[in-house]
C-alpha cells in the first residue's frame, strides 16, 4: 500500500484528469445562463453536475484500469479537485456573462469618438469646430480643383454638434461641403481632434444639373427684387406676354448695362453658377430662369423685358402644424434613449408610446440613420435619438423612464 503523500499526489492527478471536462461544462453553462437569462446557476447544481460528469469519466477510466481508483484517500482528493475546478470555472463564466454587452455590432466595435479637448460648450451644448488639415486633395477621375475653390475649402471652419460619432460627423461634413461649394464628389476623413483630410472634385455641370428634364435655362436682364433666391417662382413679362419659370441663379449689379434682353443656355451668362450669396441684393442684374422650350424661344426673340415678378409660394404646411401644436399646449423635445430604459432593445409598437405615455415619436435615429414618422415595428436601442411631441408633463414623465 502506497504512503499518504503518494496517495494525495495520485488524487491530484486523477482530479485534474477527470475534472477538465466538468470545469469546461460548468463555465460554459454559467456564462450562457447569465448572458441569456441573467440568472446564476446555484452552486448545488454545479456540484451535482460536475460529480456526475466526473463519475462517468472515472468509471470509464476504472474499466480500463481498476487500480487507478486506488484507496479512499486518493478518491477523496480527486473529488475535491473536481469540485474546486468546476466551481471556479462556473464563477468565471458567470462574471463573463455579466461583463459581455447584450448587443454587439460592427458599428459599436469600430465607433470612434472625439477628444474632449476639442469640444466647446456653447449655450450648454457641446460643439466642435472642424478644420481642414493640410491641402485639399483631388478625386481620381475628376478634374483638379481650381485654386480659389481649393483655398476656400482649406481655410474654412465649420461647427457641428459634438454628441455624434465620428462616422456620422464625416458624413455631415461631406454633405455640407457638397452643398456649400456645389462639389461633384467629396471624400472626408476625420481624426479624434476634428481635423479633416478632404479630397474633392470641382462642380461638373452645376447649372445643367438644376434644370429639370424638358426645360431650358434663359438669362434675362431685369430689375431684381431684393432677396430673390434660387428656387423662387417668378413671372417674366416681355412684349405683352408673361412667362412663368423657376430661378436658377441671380446676380445683382448696380453697374449692369442693359445690352441683350436674353441669352439661352450654353452662353456665358446662362452657364454661370449661382453666386456665393444665398439671395440677390436687388437692383438691375441678371437672372437665369428655367422655362419651357416654347417660352425660351419667346424670351430669346423678345425685344425688351418689361418686368420680373416673384410669386408667393404660400405658407409651408409643416410650420402651420408646429404652430397648431404649440397653440394646443404641446411641445417638442429631443431625447436620447438610455440603457435599461423602457425603449432599450424593443420596438415602438411593443411599448405603445402614444397610449402609455401620451407622447408621439416623430423621428428616430437608429444606427446613424434618421427615420421620419416611424412605424410600430421600428426598433430602438440605447444611444438612439428621438424627437417626440406632447404636453410638458407627459414629456417629463416619458423622459424619466426612457432617456
Image: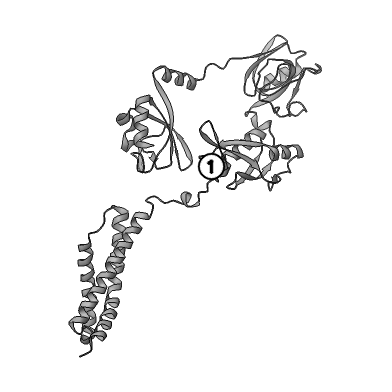
Q: Is residue 294 above or below residue 395?
A: above
Residue 236 is situated, as x and y percent measured from the top left of the image, at: 68, 15
Q: Residue furthest bottom?
A: 1
Q: Is residue 22 above or below residue 97?
A: below
| Mark 1 nearby-residue class (10 Å; few <14, some 14–19, many ≥20) | some
Depth check: give the residue in front, 252 or 18: 18
Q: Quadrant of the C terminus?
A: top left
In screen coordinates, is 350 left or right of 145? left
Q: Quadrant of residue 51?
A: bottom left
Q: Secondary structure at mark 1?
A: helix
How many numbered discs? 1
In screen coordinates, is 154 left or right of 6? right
Residue 250 appears in view = yes
Residue 314 is situated, as x and y percent measured from the top left of the image, at: 54, 16
Residue 338 is situated, as x and y percent measured from the top left of the image, at: 39, 40
**Residue drawn 55% across the image and 46% down it:** 115
Residue holding disc 1: 168
Depth check: give the residue in front, 129 or 389: 129
Residue 202 appears in view = no
Q: Quadrant of residue 142?
A: top right
Residue 219 is situated, as x and y percent measured from the top left of the image, at: 73, 22
Amino acid at each position: 500500500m502506497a504512503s499518504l503523500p503518494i496517495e494525495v499526489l495520485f488524487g491530484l492527478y486523477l482530479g485534474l484528469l477527470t475534472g477538465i471536462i466538468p470545469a469546461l461544462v460548468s463555465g460554459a453553462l454559467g456564462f450562457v445562463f447569465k448572458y441569456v437569462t441573467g440568472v446564476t446557476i446555484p452552486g448545488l447544481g454545479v456540484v451535482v453536475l460536475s460529480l456526475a460528469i466526473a463519475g462517468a469519466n472515472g468509471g470509464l477510466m476504472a474499466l480500463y484500469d481498476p487500480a487507478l481508483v486506488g484507496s479512499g484517500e486518493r478518491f477523496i482528493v480527486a473529488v475535491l479537485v473536481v469540485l474546486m475546478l468546476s466551481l471556479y470555472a462556473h464563477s468565471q463564466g458567470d462574471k463573463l456573462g455579466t461583463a459581455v454587452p447584450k448587443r454587439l455590432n460592427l458599428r459599436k466595435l469600430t465607433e470612434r469618438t472625439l477628444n474632449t479637448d476639442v469640444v466647446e460648450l456653447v449655450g450648454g451644448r457641446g460643439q466642435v469646430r472642424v478644420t481642414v488639415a493640410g491641402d485639399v486633395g483631388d478625386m481620381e477621375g475628376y478634374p483638379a480643383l481650381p485654386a480659389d475653390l481649393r483655398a476656400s475649402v482649406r481655410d474654412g471652419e465649420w461647427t457641428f454638434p459634438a454628441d455624434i460619432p465620428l462616422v456620422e460627423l464625416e458624413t455631415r461634413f461631406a454633405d455640407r461641403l457638397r452643398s456649400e461649394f456645389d462639389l461633384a464628389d467629396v471624400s472626408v476623413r476625420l481624426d479624434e481632434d476634428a481635423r479633416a483630410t478632404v479630397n474633392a472634385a470641382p462642380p461638373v455641370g452645376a447649372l445643367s444639373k438644376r434644370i429639370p428634364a424638358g426645360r431650358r435655362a434663359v438669362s434675362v436682364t431685369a430689375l431684381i427684387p431684393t432677396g430673390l433666391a434660387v428656387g423662387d417662382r417668378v413671372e417674366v413679362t416681355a412684349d405683352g406676354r408673361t412667362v412663368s419659370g423657376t430661378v436658377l441663379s441671380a446676380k445683382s449689379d448696380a453697374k449692369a448695362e442693359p445690352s441683350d434682353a436674353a441669352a439661352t443656355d450654353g452662353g456665358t451668362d446662362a452657364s454661370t453658377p449661382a453666386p456665393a450669396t444665398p439671395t440677390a441684393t436687388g437692383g438691375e442684374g441678371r437672372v437665369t430662369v428655367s422655362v419651357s422650350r416654347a417660352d425660351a424661344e419667346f424670351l430669346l426673340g423678345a425685344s425688351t423685358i418689361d418686368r420680373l415678378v416673384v410669386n408667393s409660394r404660400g405658407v409651408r404646411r409643416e410650420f402651420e402644424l408646429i404652430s397648431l401644436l404649440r397653440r394646443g399646449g404641446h411641445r417638442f423635445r429631443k431625447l436620447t434613449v438610455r440603457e435599461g430604459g423602457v425603449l432599450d432593445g424593443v420596438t415602438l409598437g411593443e411599448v405603445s408610446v402614444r397610449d402609455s405615455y401620451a407622447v408621439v415619436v416623430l423621428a428616430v435615429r437608429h444606427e446613424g440613420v434618421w427615420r421620419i414618422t416611424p412605424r410600430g415595428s421600428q426598433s430602438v436601442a440605447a444611444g438612439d435619438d428621438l424627437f417626440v411631441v406632447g404636453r410638458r408633463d407627459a414629456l417629463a414623465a416619458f423622459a424619466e423612464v426612457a432617456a
